[in-house]
Image (tube, rainbow, N blue to C red):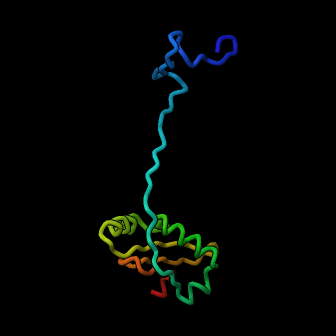
Amino acid sequence: MPGTGTPDPKHTNGEPRKPNAGSSNVPMAALVFIWLPELPLGRIVATPAALEQIPAEEIRAALQRHRRRDWGTLDPEDRAANEQALIDGARILSCYQSKAGVTFWIITEADRSVTTVLLPEDY
């Protein structure tokens, strides 16, 4: 505004000022949010070894990540297989590590009826 040190947002004709390419108030990038439906987990089960070695809170957190399609520490090939499984209706695998360093998997069956939390040696 005149006299305040802040630029007037309108031209003299009342129309909003169009920022030019060199203007510092022009955003360089825009955020785009894509909504993805959560993965249906079906009945959730866990092996005795997984329940014994992984705290319940960490299992819950990992299940939330798995549901949101965060596959954990999988390599790119397994991540791509999961993305294809979402299209084809195949089994989904995630891999996580507990705070104590225990590696565990979460597997959702192809028909999405059951999700299992297990240690790799339980497989």
Q: Nearer the viewer, residue 53 or 29?
A: 29
Q: Position of residue 12 (x, y in %)?
A: 53, 9
The residue depicted at 44 percent of the width and 55 percent of the height is: 35
Q: Quadrant of the N terminus?
A: top right
Depth order, front residue of 62/18: 18
- Residue 63, position in %: x, y? 53, 72
Farthest bottom residue in view: 48
Question: Measured from the top left, where is residue 21 in percent x and y?
Answer: 45, 23
Q: Residue furthest right?
A: 4
Task: Tell me how many marks there are.
Answer: 0
Residue lying furthest left = 88
Left-right relation of 5 to 43:
right
Residue 25, placed above or below residue 105:
above
Quadrant in which the C terminus is drawn: bottom left
Q: Is residue 53 above or below residue 2?
A: below
Front residue (pair 93, 103): 93
**Residue 84 image offset from top left, x and y in percent:** 32, 66
- Residue furthest to the front in view is 14
Please indicate whether residue 90 sits to the left or right of residue 34 in the image: left
Residue 110 in which image quadrant: bottom left
Left or right relative to 82: residue 105: right
Q: Residue drawn at (52%, 66%), measured in percent from left and top? A: 65
Name which quarter of the figure residue 91 lies in: bottom left
Q: Is residue 100 above or below residue 3?
A: below
